[in-house]
Image (cartoon, rainbow, N blue to C red):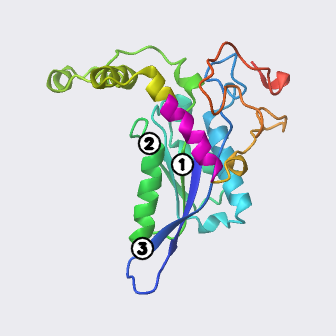
């Protein structure tokens, strides 16, 4: 889960406000499989609430002053449906006057939420927005299998624009462009190193269920970090009582 708080800053000589990111945080990474991941048994709204609560506490926000919570979630089904951003904000204790909306741009949902928040601040429509996203792969993996097309059964659209699953398309593009797995892994390995310059550890929020037993902390991860080490099996549980 990722979370950014955006506020305006009116510079001298400019009529349009600037948008400033004043803080960012996320939950630790976990294995996206039920029975293996330390976070897999939690409700998606609870994970969203974890970062929303943290961002408010870390910045002493009066949540009734939050103009909007803009959230990105791709698979908006059942537990991840019903405007997850709004539900997570309420679960985090936000004032009911702070509205919330959830959007879907597939894997770009979270960054789109941030972009939309930025645009709203720079246009002068809003002053304080919390933006981010939630996606639990352990939950979506257990949903009923559907046709391997993005059109969800719209055969007319399929005839116009056949669209395979994004993962399949990514492999196809890499093959056509001659991009190897080693090239992709090497690029991915540069991201954690860059994030460390921005205080990455401070941005990771431990996850607790309602009974306050630690599920996954800042220094505990289910999966390897910062390298290309293969995942050979599940890591030691962060909290045996929280593993299912």
Q: Nearer the viewer, residue 239 or 196?
A: 196
Say which element carries label 1.
strand
What whole-number distance in Å separates the C-alpha atoms at marks 1 and 3? 20 Å
Residue 134 can be seen, yes or no: no
Badge 3, how many Cα within 10 Å: few under 14, some, many 20+?
some
Q: Position of residue 241 (x, y in %)?
A: 84, 23
**Residue 176 magenta-drawn?**
no
Q: Position of residue 13 (x, y in %)?
A: 40, 86
Q: Residue at x 84, y 36 (%)?
A: 211
Q: Quadrant of the C terminus?
A: top right
What whole-number distance in Å separates the C-alpha atoms at marks 2 and 3? 23 Å
Work out whether 223 lies above or below 22: above
Which of the two discs, 1 and 3, labels the residue nearer the N terminus? 3
Say which element carries label 3.
loop
Which of the two discs, 2 and 3, labels the residue nearer the N terminus? 2
| Quadrant in the rendering for residue 170 | top left
Q: Residue at x 79, y 25 (%)?
A: 242
Q: Nearer the viewer, residue 27 or 66?
A: 27
Q: Which residue is mark 2?
A: 109
Q: Which residue is mark 3?
A: 124
Q: Which residue is mark 1?
A: 132
Range of the magenta residues?
186-197
Say which element carries label 2.
helix
Q: Nearer the viewer, residue 104 or 187?
A: 187
């Amino acid at each position: 889960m990722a979370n950014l708080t955006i506020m305006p800053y009116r510079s001298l000589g400019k009529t349009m406000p600037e948008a400033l990111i004043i803080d960012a945080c996320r939950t630790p990474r976990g294995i996206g499989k039920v029975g293996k991941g330390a976070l897999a048994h939690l409700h998606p709204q609870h994970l969203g609430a974890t970062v929303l609560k943290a961002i408010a506490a870390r910045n002493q926000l009066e949540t009734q002053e939050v103009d909007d919570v803009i959230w990105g979630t791709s698979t908006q089904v059942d537990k991840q449906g019903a405007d997850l951003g709004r539900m997570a904000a309420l679960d985090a204790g936000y004032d009911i006057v702070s509205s919330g909306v959830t959007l879907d741009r597939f894997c770009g949902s979270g960054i789109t939420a941030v972009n939309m928040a930025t645009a709203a601040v720079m246009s002068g429509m809003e002053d304080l927005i919390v933006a981010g996203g939630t996606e639990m792969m352990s939950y979506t993996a257990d949903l009923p299998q559907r046709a391997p097309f993005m059109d969800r059964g719209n055969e007319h659209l399929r005839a116009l624009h056949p669209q395979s699953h994004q993962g399949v398309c990514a492999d196809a593009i890499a093959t056509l462009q001659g991009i190897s797995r080693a090239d992709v892994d090497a690029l991915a390995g540069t991201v954690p190193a860059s994030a460390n310059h921005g205080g990455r550890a401070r941005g990771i929020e431990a996850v607790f269920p309602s009974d306050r037993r630690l599920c996954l902390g800042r220094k505990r991860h289910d999966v390897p970090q910062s390298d290309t080490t293969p995942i050979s099996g599940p890591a030691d549980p962060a909290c045996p009582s929280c593993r299912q």
